[in-house]
Image (cartoon, coloured by chain):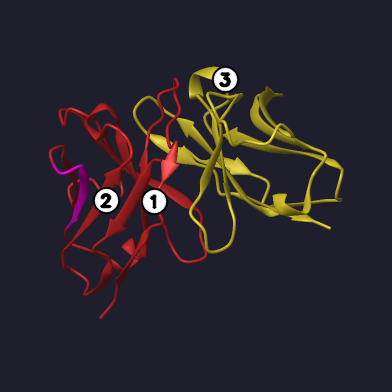
Chain colours: A yellow, B red
Amino acid sequence: QTVVTQEPSLTVSPGGTVTLTCASSSGAVTSGYWPNWFQQKPGQAPRALIYNTSNKHSWTPARFSGSLLGGKAALTLSGVQPEDEAEYYCLLYYGGDWVFGGGTKLTVL
Amino acid sequence: EVQLVESGGGLVQPGGSLRLCCAASGFTFSRHWMHWVRQAPGKGLVWVSRMSGDESRTKYADSVKGRFTISRDNAKNTLYLQMNSLRAEDTAVYYCAREGLGYYDWLFSWGQGTLVTVAS
């Protein structure tokens, strides 16, 4: 049973920079896991932010970026805004199965 | 504008069945792979199932294999999830989602979800 691990919670100050990571129990995350990232605010459906490691959707703010970092998928927010407070989920592809990380609750304080 | 609207959720007893629907509009439904994802109350997202646009290919999470069946009617622009032998642990909000046109854009657009509660 593959487990995808994210930081349970992170806190960042407005205007600051924070990196969320996504690790796989099966080893280093590579581009072949096609990492996707999603944002979910309370009471709302998730919204796609990043696909295929680093590609943004038309609605994804420029301050969000995706990458691979130290064997993990990473989502970096630069110049954090109060409205970025939310739960963030990564999704990894395992050859026909998809596994979400447990989510990171990002607090902007 | 892409729109996905789920329906069919509700309260069902353990061992019972339910069929969820996802009505799609704003895009050529038959061209897109579709997914179901669920979220138990206060918990994280869990991928459930996927189906190809031409209905020929399906995949399921191990936790629902043999109990849930994904299907679609491209003439009606509707995705379905038939859920049988329901268990308490199947209680969740169920979302349908459409893949994007970009490579490996798995869950481009989401519906608002429908709540399934399995309890006696």
Q: Which residue is found at the position 50% from the left and 24% from the top? A: A34
Residue A30, placed above or below residue A12: above
Q: Which residue is mark 1?
A: B111
Q: CA distance from mark 3 to mark 1?
A: 29 Å
For the record, the magenta segment spans B76-83
Q: Amino acid at mark 3?
A: Thr
Q: CA distance from mark 1 to mark 2?
A: 8 Å
> Residue A41 or A67: which is nearer the viewer?
A41
| Quadrant the N terminus of chain A occupies | top left
Which kind of residue does numbered mark 2 sit on? Cys
Question: Which residue is pictured at 48% across the width and 54% down the height?
Answer: A45
* Residue count near mark 3 (Cα–Cα under 10 Å), binned few <14, some 14–19, many ≥20: some
The first of marks 1 and 2 along the sequence is 2
> Given the image, on which type of amino acid does mark 1 rest?
Gly
Circle 2 residue: B22
- Residue located beneath label 3 in the image: A30
